[in-house]
Structures are given as C-alpha cells and as structure tokens.
Image (tube, rainbow, N blue to C red):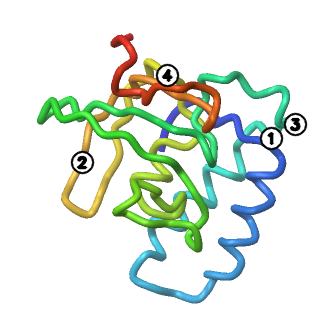
Amino acid sequence: MREQPIVISEPDARVLRGLLMARSAPSRDHEHLEELRLELERAQVVEPGQISPNVVTMHKLVRILDLSSGKQQELTLVSPAEADVGARRISVLAPLGTALLGYREGDEVEWLMPGGIRRLRIEAVQSIGTAAAPLVAAGAH
C-alpha cells in the first residue's frame, strides 16, 4: 500500500465502491480487492474538475515504463465490463489497474502483481480524445 492517499474523482469512487460491493464474495482475487477497498477508504475524493490532468483515473490513456525490463506500455483504466486486453483497456480491478489508480505522471509505482513485485514509472497521462498523436510519440518525462 502506498503512503500517500490516492486522489480519486467522486464518480470513479462511486463506480469502484459499487464494483467492490458486487464482488464481496470470497474469490481468488479477494486479497487484491481488499487492498483496493482500503485504498478507497483513505482516498481523497474530489469533484472531477479538481483532479489534476496528470493523475491516473479511469478512462485516461497512460504510458508506463517497466523499470526492470525497460518495456513501455500504453493502456487505459476501465471498468471490468469495458476491459479488453487486446485493445489495451485494463480493468481497474486488475492488479495493474489498481496499482496505477491515483498516481501522477512521473511517479514510480511498486506493486505486488501475480508474477511478483513490479516497479513501474508513469511516463504520461492523457485524457482520451485530447491529442491527435498517441502517447508513444510524446517526449519522455
């Protein structure tokens, strides 16, 4: 768990709480979902207009760098129903989605994933539809 509370929009918090309530039955993801619940409990919930454009929220395009492998990846955090790995839409309930939620461009993230601990840096965050070029073409931060 991170030391600083995440900043999350009120609509995203409402969606996430609903998703967590719907998945309250024990499952193989129970421990991970419990971490997300704890993050939400201590989150600073604000109106959407109060969130900085460089904060990772649902429906933003994010470019991350794996600090171990050097591999870059672009993805968008979405609800489980919208998730499509082939289209790089990752569920906010997946370990990677939860790990990125609330962090800012330039932050380094360390999170326990199914394959072990991953260290990532958020290279860029962009609202979908706000730029003509993909994030990969953007300069490194």
- Sequence-wise, which precedes: disc 3 or disc 2? 3
- Give the left or right position of residue 11, taking residue 19 as reference: right
Of tags 3 and 2, the one toward the viewer is 3
Q: Distance between the residues labelled 1 and 2?
A: 27 Å
Disc 4 vs disc 2: Cβ atoms closer than 8 Å? no
Query: For this rendering, which residue is in front, 2 or 76?
Result: 76
- Give the left or right position of residue 79, taking residue 71 as reference: right
**What residue did someone put label 1 on?**
45
**What residue did someone put label 2 on?**
117
Q: How far apart are marks 4 and 3 (CA)?
A: 20 Å
Indicate the secondary structure of the residue bearing disc 4. Answer: loop
Instruction: Say which residue appears at 55% left-offset and 43% top-offset.
Output: 101
Amino acid bearing label 4: Glu
**What residue did someone put label 4 on?**
105
Residue at the limit of the structure toward the front, as seen here? 132
Amino acid bearing label 3: Glu
